Image: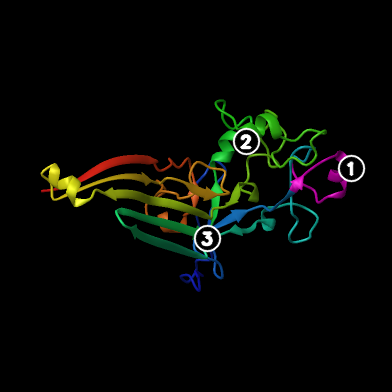
Amino acid sequence: RNEILSVADGVNEFFAGGSRFGNISINRVGHPIGSFFGYQVQGIFQSNEEIANAASQDGAAPGRFRFADLNGDGAISPADRTVLGSPIPDFTAGLNISLAVRNWDFTAFLFASVGNDIYNYTKWWTDFAPSFAGGKSRDLLYNSWLPERPNATTPIAEPISNFSTNTQSSSYYIEDGSFLRARNIQLGYTFPTRVSSRLKMDRLRIYAQGVNLFTLTGYSGLDPELQPQNVTAGTADRAMGIDYGNYPVVRQIIFGVNVGF
């Protein structure tokens, strides 16, 4: 459990986690350190009639984000921003397994993180046409909003940046970061003494090993186990769980031989 109980006199909140649209993380009393902050996406505007009946919002148009009017004043403004999630997991767990049957041996180490959110900032580059002229996601190309795709969660593909598209921090980037990873699995076989002695050996064992063999997760990014990021000096602990383009861990398949003389 993680909660900020108090801050220094004269300091209300501390923002961190820089992005192309400002800071992503907020450190607010009553919430976990490094909580994600921004507008809550209610959905995507479907028609001009829906826009007319909603709280006034800059840049509103069919196919763009509809933000929640949390303070009920009829207009979307910075006062409607809220805490969107936390990078702090509810719990982490590890499991070591060791089995041996006759000449066979099996070991495994599994690791899990449950309940943490990830701010998938890479979506800013891949899910909005004007953000970056290079590669785009399949969601933008094939699943983005169109009148005939009203249930789409990815906004309309258009060359426009404004308040209702890609210039604000929002819950669109928040994903469940829970995962289960097989960090190490090994299966070995030790040859009987009669075999190893013929080869002038006291012991002969062969094995196959998988490192980071599989990861079970619902996270859409490359790797839910984020590595330390290059953020502003002194703020790394206040801007956790942001995926700026995290390089995934490498899967390895290893075959080996243990010999004793």
The Cα atoms of the two marked residues, 1 and 3, are separated by 41 Å
Residue at the image position 64 percent from the left and 30 percent from the top: 129
The residue beneath circle 2 is 127
Q: Is residue 55 magenta?
A: yes
- Left or right: 181 with respect to 115? left
Please name the amino acid that badge 2 sits on: Asp
Say if residue 142 shows up in the picture: yes
Q: Is residue 143 magenta?
A: no
When the figure is inspected, residue 72 is found, relative to residue 233, above or below; the finding is below
Residue at the image position 66 percent from the left and 52 percent from the top: 39
Q: Earlier in the sequence, mark 2 or mark 3?
A: 3
The residue beneath circle 1 is 49
The residue beneath circle 3 is 114
CB contact under 8 Å: marks 2 and 1: no
The Cα atoms of the two marked residues, 2 and 3, are separated by 26 Å
Q: Nearer the viewer, mark 1 or mark 3?
A: 3
Tag 1, which secondary structure?
Answer: helix
Counting from the top left corner in percent of width and height, residue 132 is at 56, 30
When the figure is inspected, residue 112 is found, relative to residue 126, above or below; the finding is below
